[in-house]
Amino acid sequence: MTPRQRDIIDLIRSEVKPALGCTEPIAVALAVAKATEIIKENCPGECPDGWRLCADFKIDVEVSANILKNGMGVGIPGTGMVGIPIAAALGAVCGKSALGLEVLKNPTPEDVARAKQLVEAKAVCVSVADTEHLLYVKATVTLEDAHASAEVNPYAYAVIEDNHDCIVETSFADKILMSSESAAATADTGRKEYGLSVKEIYQFALEMPFEDIAFILEDRTLNLALAKEGLAGDYGLKVGKAIRENQQEVFGDDYLSFAMGMTAAASDARMAGCTLPAMSNSGSGNQGITVSMPIIAYAIKYGIGDEQLARALILSNLVAIHIKSFLGKLSALCGCVVASTGSACGIVYLEGGGLEEVSAAIQNMAGNITGMVCDGAKVGCAMKVASGVSCAVQSAVLALRGTCIPSTDGIIEDDVEKTIRNVGKIGSAGMKATDRMILDIMLCK
């Protein structure tokens, strides 16, 4: 394996990872859990075994506007509730920061009950931070029932910037314990370019030994389990279940409806608070679902083997990571646009298309649903996911027939890399005012 190939493998592993629950409130829970652990480490006498379950925490959370937008209406796993306050409270009661984006894994009924008590007691305060970071969380936790031996109630904070699981600063009682300056360079957008190209991604997906990329099949393990759970239960709007149950009368029993139904079902479950993790992409579980489930559905429908599936998933995930690098982790552009573009490329590969057809599929997607806005994480995201899958299949089929949107159309360029950069400009800069307006509308309802 060459150093460059190793770098790309490391990139995939860093951007494609399990996440339990919507990653914006989970980032809040992670910061709160870390701050709570710092109190334990610095006040062992005040924190006997089981202390978190009965402690009177005061939790102050400052978040960027985009975190607030994506955390307001999404289900928190295992709680039956939505929003940042319950995620923060649960992070204090039982969160384990070492688990990263699975910080809220396996809460007990007692944990959930105590977290709900903290929310009802208004022990959690959420405010919008004055920051240029699009992805920012500062969680300050105070232990209000400390013994009289302490002059001031113990308190600590943890800060997350630019990546959902990237803790850049921690403090106890105003003493900085850890601070990273590495995040300062991307303070404006959180964007990070990896030097990839569609050509390099395509060649990498085709040429890497199977044993070096077989790890990506965990995509299938996690996201297929979510899809099956979404079909078995009554989650969210039940978009996936509705598609599958109406396949004869309305949608048809073909690959398109199967892919739409399975992908939407996984999103249904995740956004409604299912306790199963998703395999995320670029910090988003829904993007991880959308980038993989249409390809997994194809493999199921047509009996595709593990090696071919793995190569398609590598291609799909890397295309999404590549496009996302020009957008930043959070933007006004729905992540479904990016993820479904990746899955369109994977479908083209499974259908026997080459680099030219993969590039055409990206161009077709860019000319189709680039304008889809993100109005926060919520159960309704499953409908956008289904729409993205439909567009992905359409774009792939057209590309395989030699049809590619020409450069005379809108934001499309002859060079697919320039088109990708145009999508990034629209989402990261062009839609800033849209982002602010969406948040204003959501807060004023």
Image (spheres, rainbow, N blue to C red):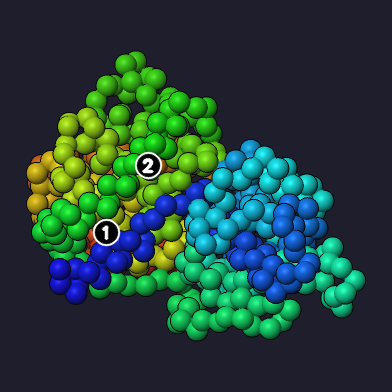
Of the numbered discs in the image, which one, if any, rests on residue 223?
2
The residue shown at (28%, 21%) is 252
User: Looking at the image, is mark 1 or mark 2 nearer the viewer?
Assistant: 2
* Mark 1 residue type: Leu
Is residue 46 visible from the viewing direction of this image?
yes
**Residue drawn at x 27%, y 53% as measured from the top left:** 215
Please say if 179 is above or below 216: below
Q: Is mark 1 on a helix, strand or loop?
A: helix
- Between residue 108 and residue 29, name the one nearer to us: 108
The percent coordinates of residue 92 (x first, y second) are: 68, 58
Residue at the disc numbered 1: 318
Q: What element carries label 2?
A: helix
Q: Is residue 53 left or right of residue 299?
A: right
Q: Where is residue 378 in the image (x, y as percent from the top left)?
A: 54, 44
* Res 351 label: none
Residue 186, relative to residue 51: is it above or below?
below
Q: In which quarter of the image is residue 139?
A: bottom right
Q: Where is residue 434 in the image (x, y as percent from the top left)?
A: 51, 59
Q: Where is residue 169 drawn, in percent x and y?
A: 58, 77
Q: Is the residue marked by circle 2 packed among few (<14), some (14-19), or many (20+) residues within 10 Å?
A: many
In this picture, residue 65 sits left or right of residue 342 = right
Residue placed furthest toward the right = 148
Task: Residue 369: tell me if it is visible.
Answer: no
**Within-10-Å neighbours for mark 1: few <14, some 14–19, many 20+:** many
